[in-house]
Image (cartoon, rainbow, N blue to C red):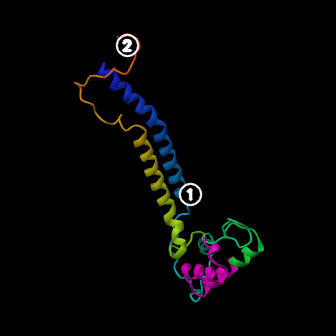
Amino acid sequence: MMDHVRRQNRWRLARRLIPVLIALTGALIGALTALAQDDPPPQPTPPFTGTAGAPVTDDQVNTIARQLYCPVCQNIPLDVCGTQACADWRQEIRAMLSEGLSGDEIMNRFAAKYGQRVLASPQRSGVNLAVWILPVVGVLAGALIVGGVIWRMAPGALAIKPSGVELDYDDLDPETVARLERELKEFSS
């Protein structure tokens, strides 16, 4: 009978934990998906000088323009935006590349001129550092809270009880105890 009670307690615990584990797995997958949606890390762009006579290509311009957002449209990278402002910015990038500026120098100039909002990924310094740290802290805090809730939901279910312990039925009605024992015998047979 004790084995049956233990199995039943384990099953109750499992029924409580399965939805929580599914939710945690979904949250983890969602977080990983959100991180995967981030633009790939910018490839270092060599300084393209116009002194060698080689013209600046569209690929070189778009490598930098992909890391900047349109000043007119919201959340549209500069390399795919069709507004006149973006066309002007791409020409400005082309001119800066011809002067020999690197991609980082060009992005720093745009950020200084138009503000941090034009950068596709915020700089990892100052207040912008919170944008990079807070999601990780939030996921860890959520995992700790869920773990604490699970721990409080079933504190006795995780404890192993010695096999020689008899259950105390003194507070229960003798008819109820007899009926339960009879049903347990039928169930375990």
Mark number displayed over residue 37: 1
Magenta segment range? 90-119
Q: Which residue is mark 2?
A: 174
The picture quadrant where one finds residue 3 is top left
Quadrant the C terminus occupies: top left
**7 w.r.t. 63: above or below:** above
Query: In the rendering, at what x and y percent does residue 130 appear?
Result: 52, 68
At label 2, the amino acid type is Pro
Mark nearer the viewer, 2 or 1:
2
Is 23 in the magenta? Answer: no
| Distance between mark 2 and mark 1 Cα atoms | 63 Å
Query: In the rendering, at what x and y percent does residue 11 appear?
Result: 40, 28
At numbered mark 1, what does the secondary structure look like: helix, strand or loop? helix
Mark number displayed over residue 130: none
Q: Answer yes or no: is residue 70 visible.
A: yes
Name the one closer to the observer, 166 or 81: 166
